[in-house]
Image (cartoon, rainbow, N blue to C red):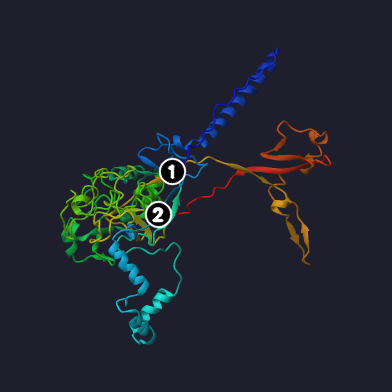
Amino acid sequence: PTPFPHEDTNLPSHTIAMPHIHTHLLLLTFTFTFLTLTSSTQSTFQNQNQKDEDINDQHHPHMIYVGRMTSSNPPKRVPHNYDNTVHYIFGTGFDSHHAAQLDWDLHLQHFGAFANEDLADRSHRLKHSDDAELLAYIKSRRHGVVSKDGMPRRYNEVDVHVLDGGVTPPKFVQVEPFFMDEVLVSNGEFAKFVAATKYETEAEVFGWSFVLRSYVRRQSLLHSENGYEVDPEAVDWVALEGAQWRMPEGPGSSYGSRMDHPVVHVSHRDAAEYCQWVGKRLPGEREYEAAARAGRFHGDNRTLYSWGDEDEEAFVAKYANLWQGEFPDNNTALDGWRATSPVRHFKPNDYGFYDTIGNVWEWMRGGKKKARIVRGASFVDSADGHINHAATLGARATLHGSTGTANVGFRCAKSPKLKDEYTWVYHDEEVHGALAIEDEFGAHHAAGVERGWEDRYDPYQMEDDDDFLNNEEDEDGYEDWDGYVTEITVDEKTGKKTKRKKRKVLKPRMRASAEL
């Protein structure tokens, strides 16, 4: 991008020449008025400066800015009056990898499951076969698969890749600039929130949360008279009574020695409540992936992982907390950790974000209550997908919003402060239309101007306005009435003056990304 012009903020100073006033009373009155106006003016300029804060002057502790940068040295953030959105390819990382598997998938997509037969035999079978399996396949290929209830696809529902759960096919998206925490929210930080607000997580209210069966601290709880329930979609996870963020593996465990580990057993609501308490919010999944990819945005540099494409276990163990060994009973902890790890233990990505792959899944903004989005994979996943999810930059899953589990945490994000832009809105019948009352015969009768304007604007005031009658204008060409102004225009031919009442309103912003 070309260098961006910088606005000149050096405003000319103005000197006010005041006549010498001999009357002390008049001088005191003038001084009091001058000080009042000066105070009001300073307050106005302070508020304006606060609103118009340069994006390069906005900094938040332990958060990293993600947005377009200039090509200058050192680079600066592109201001909001230019396109400063992040453009990248969003979705699964397997679109340009594993070439042999991809070629075979494309082969089946074009020729079907019976592609091993030659063209003549295939055509004959398609025309004359009574094979139910073949006919069902042909129908699904021609018409698509309809859900059992016959309803159309839900809003925001996407197709996902079988290995990493990432959105497929990948698509080109743009995301507005944002700040995101460089690390996951730790037990220590969450404990401060609980101490200050006396907040109870949903796992504490429900009395149970999900724990990996082989990690339950007191295995005797699994053999109690009451037994235990498992997640029907993940039978290795048990609904353990007493498990919560203070006791990650259930009764007998403690978070005391893991203050710098990510907090777990928090639901989507718990995460959102914490972020709101610190003046932030949860990140959107497109924001998260933009931060996780850290500049690896396009086909020429897009990789499966934040470190590249290498997926050998010994190499990956240097960069991410993932599972090594036989799942679910034997984690060899080649990376040094059997469960969660400290939030700053592994190397950050090129932007400086830690644990964008592995350690714990992270709650995202958006989705639905029954299908909230999590990103980033966790310590029970593997790089290539041979154990649970493939922990790629596109790794994605959905959980019920109230779910608490030992491998889901979160971090927060924040939008930069934008400059307030204003525009004028005219109040006349050309814009708002005339209100009318319909009588019993269907006729419409004018009912005056819109309610809420007439009590602020006296039409007879124009007739009593000396400046209007004497063809004189105020210094700025406008006349103020309780926050509203009147624009004076003069017809060039007739010299007739007309006034149109208008007000200043905030200009609506068009967002480049409409992520929920």
| Mark linked to residue 499 | none
Amino acid at pointer 2? Ile
Nearest the viewer among 110 and 482 is 110
Please state the total of marks drawn on the protein image.
2
- Mark 2: secondary structure: strand
- Which x, y percent locates residue 423? 62, 43
Please name the residue shown 45% across and 72% down the image. 151
* On-image quarter of the C terminus: bottom left
Crowdedness near tag 1: few (<14), some (14–19) or many (≥20) residues, C-alpha within 10 Å: many
Amino acid at pointer 1? Arg
| Marks 2/1: CA–CA distance | 15 Å
Please name the residue shown 46% across and 38% down the image. 55
Q: Is residue 483 visible?
A: yes
Q: Is residue 209 shown above or below 31?
A: below
> On the image, numbered disc 1 is attached to which residue?
68
- Mark 1: secondary structure: loop
> On the image, numbered disc 2 is attached to which residue?
89
